Amino acid sequence: MTAPETTILNVESNHYPPLLLRHPGNPILSGKDWPYSINSVFNAGATLLPDGTTLLLCRVEDRRGLSHLCAARSQNGVDGWQIDREPTLMPNPQAYPEEIWGIEDPRITFVPELQQYVVTYTSYSRGGPGVSLALTKDFRSFERYGVIMPPDDKDTALLPRRIDGYWALIHRPMTTLGAHMWISYSPDLRYWGRHRLMLEARKGAWWDANKIGLSPPPIETARGWLVLYHGVRHTPSGCLYRLGLALFDLGNPEKCLLRGDSWIFGPEAKYERHGDVDDVVFPCGYTMSPDGDTINIYYGAADCAIALARASVRTLLAWLDANGSCERRQRVADL
Ligand code: BMA
C-alpha cells in the first residue's frame, strides 16, 4: 500500500495523540498566490482585526534572498486571501542600517493599553539577526522603534500587558553556551533590562537540545501563559524544526510551571518535509476562534509556504498536565 500523497512518514502507526490538526486545504498560501514576483512566502504573524478579519503578516522572500513583510487578509482565515498588491513593510536600511539584509519572522501582539498592534521582527544586520519593533493601528502605516535587541537575537514576542508595571518581551539571544529563551522588561518599549532566563534548551540527544525559540506569541489562559516553542535538532542531513509546549506563571512569566518532554508537532506532510529548507514547521502566529478554545496556528512549512493547524487550548493544557513536569531552574550565573 502506498502512503497518502501528503504524508511520507509512517504516521499511521504513531500512537501519540494528534494535538495539532492540519487543515485539509494546506498549504493555504504559497508563492503562486502572490500578486508580484517573489521566491517564497512563509513564517507569518497573525491577528484578528476588529471586524473579525484574519490578518497574516507574511515573511516574503525575493530572489535576492532578502525578505520583507506583506499583509494578507481573509474573512474566514482559510481562503479568499486579499494580498497587498505591494510589500506592506520593506526593509529601510537608509534609516535603519540593521535592516540591510531584510526583515523576517514577525510576531504580532495587540496591546489594549496602546490600542495598537506591536510587531516584533528579525532585522538582518551585518552583525547577524537582531530584534526590531514597530507599532501599527492598521497594518498600512507603521511607527518603527528600530532595533531593540542587538545581534545575535530573534524569536521575539511582546506580552499584551504590563507585568508589575513593565512591558515584557520574550526573545532568544545566542551565546556560546546555547540558544535559550529569555525574558526582558521595559518601561517604554525602547529601553530593556532585567534580563532573565525563561526556558533552557536541553542537552544531549533531546529533540530540543542546544537551540530553542519562541514560536507564536504566548497564549493567555486562566492557568498561565501557554507557550509553543520550537526545538532545533541538528542532524547529519540538516536541522529538524519541531514544536513543544510549556506553561508559565501569569504574574511571573519567567517561572515555568510545566514543560512537556516530547514534541507535539513536527514535519510530516510533504509540504513540511520538502521545500527551500526541508523539515521545518515554524509558526509565528495564531488566532483564537469565537469558541474561546480553538486556536488557529499559522506556520511556515519548509520555508516555502504557509499552512494552518488547529488545536484546543483545553486539550493542550490537559496534555501538559499528563505529560509535563516542573522545569529545573538553572541559575543565570551558570550560563
Ligand atoms: C530559523 C529562522 C526561520 C526559518 C528557519 C528554518 O533560524 O531563520 O526564519 O524558517 O530557520 O530555515
Image (tube, rainbow, N blue to C red):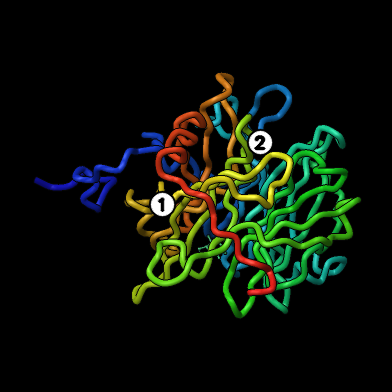
**Which structural element holds mark 1?**
loop
Count of all numbered marks drawn on residues in the image: 2
Quadrant of the rendered image containing residue 289? top right
Q: Is residue 79 visible?
A: no
Q: Residues within 10 Å of mark 1 (few under 14, many from 20)?
A: some
> Residue shown at 81%/62% (left/top)?
148
| Residue 51 screen position, x and y as percent | 71, 22
- The picture quadrant for ligand 1 comes to bottom right
Q: Nearer the viewer, mark 1 or mark 2?
A: 1
> Residue shown at 63%/40% (left/top)?
225
For label 1, the residue is 263
User: Is 245 located above or below residue 204 in the figure?
Assistant: above
Quadrant of the rendered image containing residue 183? bottom right
Q: Residue 325 versus residue 6: which sits nearer the camera?
A: 325
- Which residue is situated farthest in the top direction here? 291
> Residue shown at 49%/29% (left/top)?
314
